[in-house]
Amino acid sequence: MSAVGWFIMGIAALIGGAELVVHGGSRLAARLGVPPIVIGLTIVSIGTSTPELAVGIEAGLEGSGSLAVGNIAGAITFNLLFILGLSALLKPLAVSVRTIRFGLPTMIVVAVALMAMAWNGVLARVEGAVLVGAALIYTVMIVRLTRRESRAVRAEFAREYGTPRDGRAPRDIVWNLGALAVGITVTVVGSEWLVDGAVELARMLGVSDAFIGLTVVTFGTSSPELVTTVVGTLRNTRDIAIGNLLGSSVYNILLILGVTCLVAPSGVHVGPDLTRVGLPVMTAVTLVCVPVFVSGHRVTRLEGALFVGAYVAYLTYLVLTRT
């Protein structure tokens, strides 16, 4: 029961911490004059990935590499199948040209690269450095692409994150800095609780760290993306919702897993369960998105239902086989 308690408290802390990081970071950036569209595509995407980052670092330091990689692979599969499918099921989802030409191809390349790197069973520090470097390049490309966005898209992001300011409200800046600092602290503490509880649960249930990472840890760390996407769908801020979903998935691999590899003393060890199941399924899901996104530039309610059903089937398989 103590393992379950720590696990639940860890999830709660991660959700609350991520919310503070996203809001504190986005409002602070707006106050300092960062364009809202850049905030949405970078700061919010990274902010909603802070639970995965905190869990990855904690798991890497404790030698639970399969938990960290399983969490990343599980989160991306959950993002693209369940969250995106649920969003389309609520309302048919229009897919922007930028997503088809840049977001999705980037996601596919990154997923294939991760599977290739992990095929030998370990992600070394050198590979972590490559991933972090790619994250910086990806961020620069995102900032450059925002200059080409339509006026309507810019207005949508401005409504969601506010108009850039000149930093003339010191009290607001201090307040947002405080929210950001508290959010990071809560997230770090929550990750320690969650990882300790998850590892203990795996031992109690006789399952692998990979299984725990692909399932229960994924649900906890992906909660910010789920909330952001559902709220964005209901508010009709669809570019924000989908941009955040794909952006978070890319940052999960490049930045989050890259940093995890760098802090792990002997690299991140990847179990055979992940190289045989978790990572191939994640890559296959990104490829399946291609015909769905390209056909009519939209995800219909039927396709959304099929995505959600596919995730439920995958989850059932994981539970039955205890991968």
Image (cartoon, helix red, strand yellow):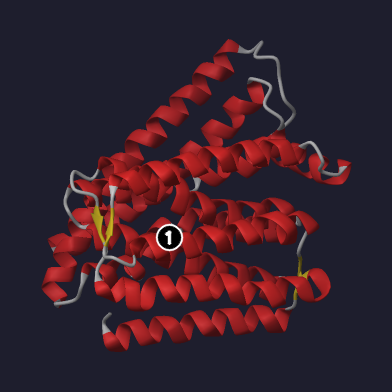
Front in this rendered view, residue 65 or 307: 65
Q: Is residue 192 above or below residue 175?
A: below
Question: Would you say 196 lies left or right of 175 here?
Answer: left
Q: Which residue sits at x=41%, y=36%?
A: 183
Q: Position of residue 145 (x, y in %)?
A: 74, 41
Q: So how many labels did they put on this image?
A: 1
* Residue of label 1: 114
Regarding residue 187, the answer to whether it shows in the image is yes
Q: Which residue sits at x=43%, y=83%?
A: 314
Q: Position of residue 200 (x, y in %)?
A: 14, 63
Q: Position of residue 167 (x, y in %)?
A: 65, 14
Q: Position of residue 129 (x, y in %)?
A: 38, 41
Q: Which residue sits at x=69%, y=22%?
A: 33
Question: Would you say 266 lies left or right of 24 here?
Answer: left
Q: Is residue 254 above or below residue 3?
A: above
Q: Regarding mark 1 in the picture, which secondary structure is present there?
A: helix
Q: Which residue sits at x=39%, y=86%?
A: 316
Few, some or many residues within 10 Å of mark 1 (<14, 14–19, 20+):
many
Regarding residue 235, the answer to whether it shows in the image is no
The part of the image, by quadrant, that contains residue 149 is top right
Q: Quadrant of the N terminus?
A: bottom left
Q: Quadrant of the C terminus?
A: bottom left
Residue type at mark 1: give it: Leu
Question: Would you say 312 lies left or right of 296 here?
Answer: left
Q: Which residue is at the far right? A: 151
